[in-house]
Image (spheres, helix red, strand yellow):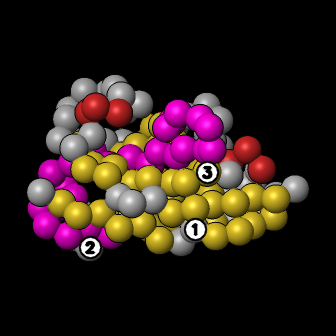
């Protein structure tokens, strides 16, 4: 079992940067594929980025590719999401997730066993 707590959200202007963190307690992050999802008001939760359990290969949704980076510190059980060149459409609650799966279906919500409580990111134009 792992408990996930996100931080780093807030308000930003278009073009700004924010860095989200997700700290885990319990089982080591090295046992999981780690990911970020987001959910905007009235919309379904959507995949943003993932770091695979094997080797930490990175994967991104098309909407954030080239602007966001994901990194993980398995020793410190911390996951990061560096968000650059933010856009108003990035406004959402961002969730950290952990899943003990090895396939590449990063956007399949049911692959993830554990979720954080979310952190709000608001980007104004």
Q: Secondary structure at mark 3?
A: strand
Q: Earlier in the sequence, mark 3 or mark 1?
A: 1
State yes or no: residue 29 in magenta: yes
Does 107 sit above or below residue 27? above
Q: Position of residue 4 (x, y in %)?
A: 30, 63
Q: Position of residue 49 (x, y in %)?
A: 47, 43
The residue that label 3 is drawn on is: 92
Q: Residues within 10 Å of mark 3 (few under 14, many from 20)?
A: many
Drawn side of residue 83 relative to residue 55, left or right: right
Does 50 sit above or below residue 21? above
Boundaries of the magenta span: 23-46
Q: Earlier in the sequence, mark 2 or mark 1?
A: 1
Q: Residue at x 47, y 71 (%)?
A: 7
Q: Earlier in the sequence, mark 3 or mark 2?
A: 2
Can residue 38 be seen by looking at this rendering? yes
Q: Secondary structure at mark 2?
A: loop
| Position of the C terminus by quadrant | bottom right
The residue that label 2 is drawn on is: 76
Q: Position of residue 12 (x, y in %)?
A: 75, 67
Viewer-nearest residue: 82 or 117 = 117
Drawn side of residue 48 relative to residue 112, left or right: right
Does 22 sit above or below residue 111? below
Q: Residue at x 54, y 44 (%)?
A: 39
Q: Position of residue 13 (x, y in %)?
A: 81, 64
Q: Between marks 3 and 1, how big is the CA–CA gap? A: 10 Å
The residue that label 1 is drawn on is: 9
């Amino acid at each position: 079992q792992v408990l996930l707590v996100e931080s780093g959200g807030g308000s930003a202007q278009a073009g700004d940067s924010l860095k989200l963190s997700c700290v885990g307690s319990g089982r080591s992050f090295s046992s999981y594929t780690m990911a970020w999802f987001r959910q905007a008001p009235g919309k379904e939760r959507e995949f943003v980025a993932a770091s695979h359990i094997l080797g930490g290969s990175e994967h991104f949704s098309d909407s954030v590719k080239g602007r966001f980076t994901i990194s993980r510190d398995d020793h410190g059980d911390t996951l990061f999401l560096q968000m650059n060149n933010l856009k108003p459409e990035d406004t959402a609650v961002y969730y950290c997730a952990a899943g003990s799966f090895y396939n590449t279906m990063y956007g399949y919500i049911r692959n993830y066993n554990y979720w954080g409580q979310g952190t709000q990111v608001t980007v104004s134009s």
